[in-house]
């Protein structure tokens, strides 16, 4: 039995989609266990280029069965769109993609409230994706959620009616427009009719797979430092993002997780508000222009910064990383010098990430080490030895800081543009 958890070691957008896509080659099951469609994973392979938000990125492996666990919150329209997109592309997910009936649904009022809350916060807005993620998780833990299992009885109608009575009062108070029960009911009944063939209880399937020595590839949404407890709260997501979330979100006991792959971008990016110690503010700098990215989910321009080794070290310890997949090393090509944050200082004292909260992290001073860059195009490199010496040193610096070996190195966006050590 092999259970591999793939987690992002920064603030998301590390390249987990690509990592899962190539790691899925030997997987029997590929699974999502947390988050929702606020996560966007980009996959480029022989089928084309895809931006996936709910279906596991490993679904392209023809022999793998895809699982969406009960820990995932689902926007039905998004899931239907992805299924249709994948089937049209020839991937064929019918009969090998299953959704837990325990999954909570993102309802129209969740998205409306997400936007109204952000607007009401003004300058103090969290910077959410406005996909309804926070409100649906709030409903989940306050006993107000609606799950797929509710459609199998009369529970859906009664629960929806009750929730609309509650939510419409809040929506109206915040200046929004009330939702109509019949319209929402009919819309979601239609979604259920389309998705019913994919909904089944996953517990026995997962447990039987573990007993049969199958290989599971668990795909985290978001990144370590968007975790509700260990992230830069309140500038975080609404779910747990570390590997332990797979226990509640999919039904896999913690002791069965054999490997934890930390996907680490060769620099740092972040979307939305919150502290980012190594952020580059000089928009005219060569590094800023090199690192510039657009988020797959929101289309927003990502904030960019130098690699933060304190974050990587903390993520490795917190999640028990066994190996690292270093992505986008090729983006650093052409820089004469590269800055790497090796330590935090606050009021003249060395501090760890865990020593401060989000507001303290916003005040830390980074201690940088300047390392020489490289000018060579590394996108065609097939082995570690083919990388420029300075690129090799950069990889080893990451290994030393994290105390974890770098097993894979991304030198381009495509699946085959990956060095395997």
Image: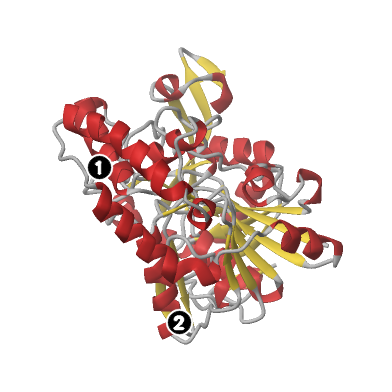
Where in the figure is residue 105, as x and y percent of width and height?
43, 50
Q: Which mark is residue 223?
A: none
Q: Residues within 10 Å of mark 1 (few under 14, many from 20)?
A: many
- Viewer-nearest residue: 43 or 373: 43
Where in the figure is residue 146, as x and y percent of width and height?
45, 45
- Viewer-nearest residue: 241 or 347: 241
Q: Which residue is mark 1?
A: 112
Vertical position of residue 336 compared to residue 97: above or below: above
Residue 133 horizontal side relative to residue 14, left or right:
left
> Residue at 32% of width from left, 35% of height from top?
273
Q: Which residue is mark 2?
A: 87
**Is there any visible trace of residue 290 in the rendered image?**
no
> Residue at 64% of width from left, 72% of height from top?
65
> Residue at 53% of width from left, 75% of height from top?
415
Q: Secondary structure at mark 2?
A: helix
Q: In the current view of this chain or complex, which residue is farthest to the front? A: 154
Instruction: Tell me where residue 62 sits by quadrant.
Output: bottom right
């Amino acid at each position: 039995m092999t259970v591999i958890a793939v987690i992002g070691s920064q603030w998301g957008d590390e390249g987990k989609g690509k990592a899962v896509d190539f790691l899925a080659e030997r997987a029997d099951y590929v699974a999502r266990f947390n988050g929702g469609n606020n996560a966007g994973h980009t996959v480029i392979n022989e089928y084309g280029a895809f931006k996936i938000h709910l279906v596991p990125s490993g679904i392209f492996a023809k022999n793998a069965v895809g699982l969406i666990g009960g820990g995932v919150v689902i926007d039905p329209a998004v899931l239907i769109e992805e299924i249709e997109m994948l089937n049209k592309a020839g991937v064929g997910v019918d009969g090998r993609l299953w959704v837990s009936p325990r999954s909570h649904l993102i309802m129209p009022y969740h998205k409306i409230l997400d936007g109204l809350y952000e607007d009401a916060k003004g300058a103090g807005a969290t910077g959410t994706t406005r996909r309804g993620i926070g409100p649906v998780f709030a409903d989940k833990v306050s006993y107000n959620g609606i799950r797929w299992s509710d459609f199998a009885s009369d529970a859906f109608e009664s629960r929806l009616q009750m929730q609309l009575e509650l939510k419409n009062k809040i929506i109206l108070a915040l200046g929004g427009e009330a939702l109509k029960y019949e319209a929402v009911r009919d819309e979601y009944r239609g979604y259920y009719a389309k998705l019913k063939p994919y909904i089944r209880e996953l517990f026995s399937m997962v447990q039987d797979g573990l007993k049969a020595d199958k290989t599971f590839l668990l795909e985290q949404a978001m990144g370590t430092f968007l975790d509700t407890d260990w992230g830069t709260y309140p500038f975080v997501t609404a779910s747990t993002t570390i590997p332990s979330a797979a226990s509640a979100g999919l039904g896999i006991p913690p002791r069965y997780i054999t490997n934890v792959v930390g996907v680490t971008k060769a620099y740092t990016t972040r979307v939305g508000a919150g502290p980012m110690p190594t952020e580059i503010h000089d928009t005219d700098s060569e590094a800023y222009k090199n690192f510039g990215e657009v988020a797959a989910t929101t289309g927003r321009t990502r904030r960019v910064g130098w690699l933060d080794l304190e974050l990587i070290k903390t993520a490795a310890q917190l999640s028990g990383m066994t190996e690292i997949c270093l992505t986008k090393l090729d983006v650093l090509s052409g820089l004469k010098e590269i800055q790497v944050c090796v330590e935090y200082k606050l009021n003249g004292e060395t501090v760890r990430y865990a020593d401060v909260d989000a507001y303290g992290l916003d005040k830390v001073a980074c201690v940088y080490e300047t390392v020489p860059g490289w000018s060579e195009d590394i996108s065609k490199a097939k082995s570690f030895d083919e990388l420029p010496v300075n690129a090799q040193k950069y990889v080893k610096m990451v290994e030393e800081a994290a105390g974890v070996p770098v097993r894979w190195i991304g030198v381009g966006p495509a699946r085959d543009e990956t060095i395997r050590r």
